[in-house]
Image (cartoon, helix red, strand yellow):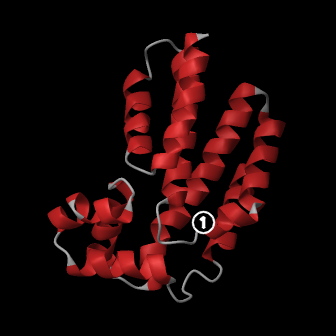
Amino acid sequence: MIYLILILALILRLININQSLWLDEAINVLAAKDLGFIHFITGYPIGDFHPPGYFLILWVVGHTFGFSEFFVRLPSVIFGVLTVYLTYLIGNKLVNEKIGLTAGLFLALNPLHIYYSQEARMYAFSAFAVTLSFYFLIKLLEISGKFIFLYAFSIILVLYSDYVAYFALIPQFIYVLV
C-alpha cells in the first residue's frame, strides 16, 4: 500500500513541473548557471538569506542534467516523495502501520506540500531534512547509540537546508532532555 501512496505522491508532484520558473526560482537558476561552484556555494547564499545546502544540489543537478524547469525542480520532487515515505515510517514506528499509511497519504495529498515539492527552492529539502532528523532521533532512542552518526548527518542536513528548520531541533533537544 505504501508503494501506491508513493506513486500517487510522485504523480501529483510531477504535474505541471515544467511550468515557467517564478522570480526566486529563476534568480537561483540563473545564478547557478552563471556563477562558479565555490562562489555559488559560499557567496550567493548570503544574499539569498538561506544556507548553502540546496544551492549545492541545484548547482550540481543543473550542471549535470541541464537547467530546464524539469531538472531544476526534480530534486524537490524527489525530496517531497522521500518525505512522504519518512512520514509513513515514523507513523508506523510510533503507532502502527495503519497510522503510518494514513499519515503518508495525508502528506502525499497535502496541496501545500505538493506545491513546495514542485519548486526549485529549498523548502522540500528542508522538510525532508527535518523529517529525516526526527526519524533518526526515534531510531537512536530506540537502539541506543547505533544511529548517532546518521542522526548527526541529518542534523547537518537541517542546518544546511533552511534557517526556519532550526526550530525543529528545539523539541528534539527538549525531548532528549526530558
Q: Is residue 1 visible?
A: no
Q: Position of residue 99 (x, y in %)?
A: 81, 37
Q: Is residue 17 visible?
A: yes
Is 78 on the left or on the right of 101, as rendered?
A: left
- The amino acid on which the numbered mark 1 sits, given as a three-letter code, is Tyr
- The one nearer the camera, 30 or 100, is 30
The secondary structure type at the circle numbered 1 is: helix
When asked about the image quadrant of residue 80, the answer is bottom right
Residue occupying the point 46% across, 65% down: 75
> Label 1 belongs to which residue?
116
Residue occupying the point 29% across, 77% down: 31
Residue occupying the point 73% across, 54% down: 107
Residue occupying the point 67% across, 58% down: 6
Q: Position of residue 48 (x, y in %)?
A: 37, 65
- The one nearer the camera, 29 or 10, is 29
Is 150 on the left or on the right of 89, as rendered?
A: left
Asked if residue 62 is positioned above or below residue 95 in the image, the reply reads below
Q: Residues within 10 Å of mark 1 (few under 14, many from 20)?
A: many
Q: Position of residue 78 (x, y in %)?
A: 52, 62
- The one nearer the camera, 134 or 4, is 134
Asked if residue 19 is positioned above or below residue 4 in the image, the reply reads below
